[in-house]
Amino acid sequence: MSAVSAIAHPNIALAKYWGKRQGEGNYPAVPSLSITLAGMETRTRVRFQEGLLRDRFVLDGQEELGRPRERVVAMLERVRELSGLRMFAEVESKNDFPTASGLASSASGFAALAVAALEAGGIGAPSEHARERASDLARRASVSAARSVYGGFVELAAGPVAPARDERLVARQLPVPDAFRDGFRVLVAVATEAKKDVSSTDGMGRTARESPYYGAWLDEAPRLCARLREAALAGDFDTVGALAESSCLAMHACAMAAGIVYWNAVTVDLMAAVRELRAGGTRVYFTIDAGPHVKVLAEAADVPVATARLRAVPGTVRVIETRAGGGAALESGPHEASGGAR
Ligand code: PMV
């Protein structure tokens, strides 16, 4: 069968997901809201082939075994189930940014894999229905990947409390005002090139088991997400920024109380630089995922001054400027139509 290639972008959660529903299916315990980022990408190629003895997964030029391969195989299994195909596949994936370091490579990776594998399996018709199928498939591998299937601002509801085996949970695009979306920038301040030591799945499992604040997080996260959603729909940049900071700090405080600290010294200095910029009148806000990097939310006009200040923080490896990007798309393009940034 022919090889199919897809591209997807990472996304940054403004209202964070942290914690899973109990049981199978990888359903989130809280709703989340993110922005899909142009400027960083994963490119994934899938080919189902007669004669292969098992699924192969090559990431950034290196064959992966163990857990990363198992997650890919689980997705391919589901595509085989849905399509009736019986062949194994070869999957090759490349990121143009550091893998597994809190830069959301699992989001773009599994979004690209879902779109490419469904198409390679012959069930990826370029319709809205197919995009929902890709979002659900991606979510089963990595919750945040469900959101990277769509472009622009994207929301994902919490999973059902007792999900039936095949219950669908898909992300959807949030219709924010054009000017708000087009002027929104995310500056990714890279705080190390090293891989992270606690995966988000392990981190949230431990948080649920051991954090005394997990119950408070489960109560608060939906409220924060609902308020952030309203602010985004109203195009209110400062309220979105302030709530994104609150969501990030609540998530990390909850995880830290279980002994999980994703930050390093550079992270803390970058947070201080953002606060200092704000005290001086530059409207910038930070958010941090399951890694040490700091993502700074800014409006386009403030990018030069904010970038210069972040670069001046000792230990900052680099600052990547990103903006709202499109959803996951086949390289030949049929998925592009409905998943763009708008
Ligand atoms: O989807 P996962 O398992 O990669 O976890 C993502 C967790 C956060 O990035 C910290 C939050 C989020 O909503 O993306």
Image (cartoon, rainbow, N blue to C red):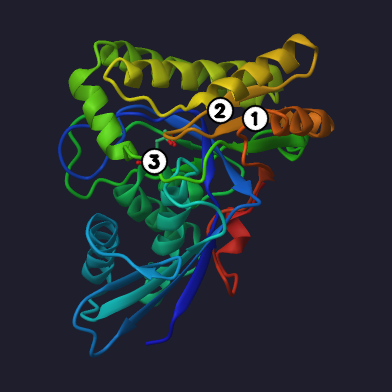
Ligand 1's quadrant: top left
329 sits left or right of 201 in the view: right
Does the Cβ of the disc 2 residue fall within 8 Å of ligand 1?
Answer: no
Q: In this view, does 203 lie above or below 36?
A: above
Residue under label 2 = 266
Residue found 71% across the figure and 36% down from its top: 185
Q: For the view shown, which residue lies furthest in the front direction?
A: 314
Residue 133, position in %: x, y? 38, 57
Task: Report the residue marked by disc 1.
Answer: 314
Amino acid, disc 3:
Lys
Q: How far apart are marks 2 and 3 (CA)?
A: 14 Å
Report the Cα–Cα distance between label 1 and label 2.
7 Å
Report if residue 309 is visible in the image. yes
Answer above or below: position of 88 versus 14: below
Provide the residue designation for mark 3. 196
Q: Residue furthest bottom?
A: 51
> In the figure, residue 29 lies in which quadrant?
top left
> How many numbered discs, if any?
3
Q: Which residue is drawn at 55% across and 53% down?
A: 97
Do the residues bearing badges 1 and 2 touch, measured as CB atoms within 8 Å?
A: yes
Of 8 and 31, the residue lying toward us: 8
Kind of residue sitting beneath label 1:
Pro
Q: Does the residue labelled 1 lie within 8 Å of ligand 1?
A: no
**In the rendered structure, which amino acid carries the disc numbered 2?**
Val
Q: Which of marks 1 and 2 is nearer the N terminus?
A: 2
